[in-house]
Amino acid sequence: MRNRSVTIFQLIRDLRHSGSLSAVRVIILLFLFICSYPKQIAAAEDLPERLSDSEFWQLITDLSEPNGHFRYENFVSNEYNLQSVIPFVLANAGRPDAYVGVGPEQNFTYIAALSPKIAFIIDIRRQNLLEHLMYKAIFELSRDRADFLSLLFSRAHPAEFTTSPTPAELFKPFHSTKGDRAVFDQNFSRIMDRLTVVHKLPLDDDDRANLRYVYNTFFEHGSDLDYTVGGFYGVDDPPTYENLMTADDGQGKMRSFLASEEDFQKVKKLEENNLVIPVVGDFAGPKALRGVGRYIAAHQARVSVFYLSNVERYLFSSLDVWRRFYVNVTVLPYDGKSLFIRSIFDSSYGSVNRTSGIDEIMTAFSEGSIWSYGDVIALSH
């Protein structure tokens, strides 16, 4: 793996000499780097095949930062073309160790395609953590994709399919089925029992209320749920939940996590083994991303893919914020095949998903070649 100790010290030296950093900031950056750099372990174990419930919750607690704020609630992705990079990533990302991502359900599509051994979902909002816990319970309670949709939207289960349905066939029976409040209440009790009784996760009253709020949003909107429900009002109409699940990769292959039973079961197995770990954290924050990096490095693994959505766009609103993010990335164990996936939105809120090598971006950063979001986009392929 790349020796990032050299890179970070070169970076700080260059910034200092250029006048971009004060002496105080140099000291702060050095302190943060030394404190967060992964400690080498004489005989580190491999990534676990399963985490106990207590280990799962302890990781969430240890890694998470205080709840933050974002302008939209992000119940569902608005990235219709998120699958387009999957063929390239499968061909170029190397062995599937650890996946790091942000946001709601689009992570499941990348996880289903890439088959990582462990996944960390870092989002600034605790509501996203709770949404992922909701998903965790629903995955575990569902035998198959039809079960999953029935539980997710609190709609009556359709008749059994005689053959494995396509995504479009899977959603069709739910079009004419209305949500049932009694079914919703029963399902919510099952979800909470799964989390707090079976897994013994100590969710407090606020967490329970917010989780119910998220689940109720899925109940009220069903498969028509889209990004506007979270407060977004763009120029175009964002894709619905069904649109996202029935999309393809641009080459005719459907790759959503509901595209096939095999894809669904991949995610279900990781959830059952407590290996999809939601974390509250700011990408530029002092704890979450660095903690994830330390954990992965301690298990002698690497980050295969880091899905950023368009978070960098917001980080570049402040000079210090985007710098802190890339300093945090130096703590992640990555190599020449590790990839960023990012979403790039245009003025009409249409998006394309692109990749870049993590090492490529970090080298450019350390050499002083990145100063704006445009520089990052230019290095995206």
Image (tube, rainbow, N blue to C red):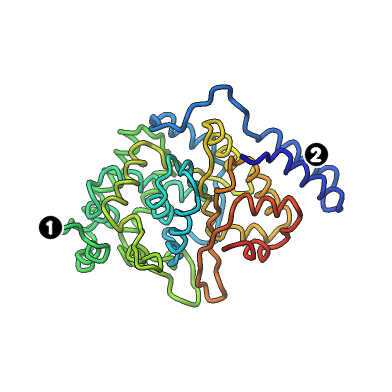
Query: Is residue 91 or residue 54 the one in the foreground?
Result: 91
Q: CA distance from mark 2 to mark 1?
A: 65 Å
Residue at x 49% of width, y 26% of height: 45
* Total residue callouts: 2
Name the front one of labels 2 and 1: 1
Residue at x 52% of width, y 58% of height: 309
Residue at x 56% of width, y 46% of height: 281
Residue on which the image places disc 2: 27
Residue 263, placed above or below residue 228: above
Residue 59, placed above or below residue 164: above
User: The disc labelled 1 sits on which kind of residue?
Assistant: Thr
Q: Residues within 10 Å of mark 2 (few under 14, many from 20)?
A: few
User: The disc labelled 2 sits on which kind of residue?
Assistant: Ile
Image coordinates for residue 171, horizontal then vertical, percent: 25, 64
- Looking at the image, is mark 2 or mark 1 earlier in the sequence? 2
Residue found farthest to the top = 42
Residue at x 84% of width, y 48% of height: 16
Image coordinates for residue 284, horizontal then vertical, percent: 64, 48
Q: Residues within 10 Å of mark 1 (few under 14, many from 20)?
A: few
Q: Which mark is residue 162?
A: 1
Q: Quadrant of residue 106?
A: bottom left
Query: Is residue 65 or residue 255 the one in the foreground?
Result: 255
Q: Is residue 15 visible?
A: yes
Image coordinates for residue 170, horizontal then vertical, percent: 23, 61
Q: Quadrant of residue 133?
A: top left
Dot 1 falls on a residue whose secondary structure is loop
Q: Is residue 210 visible?
A: no
Q: Quadrant of residue 4?
A: top right
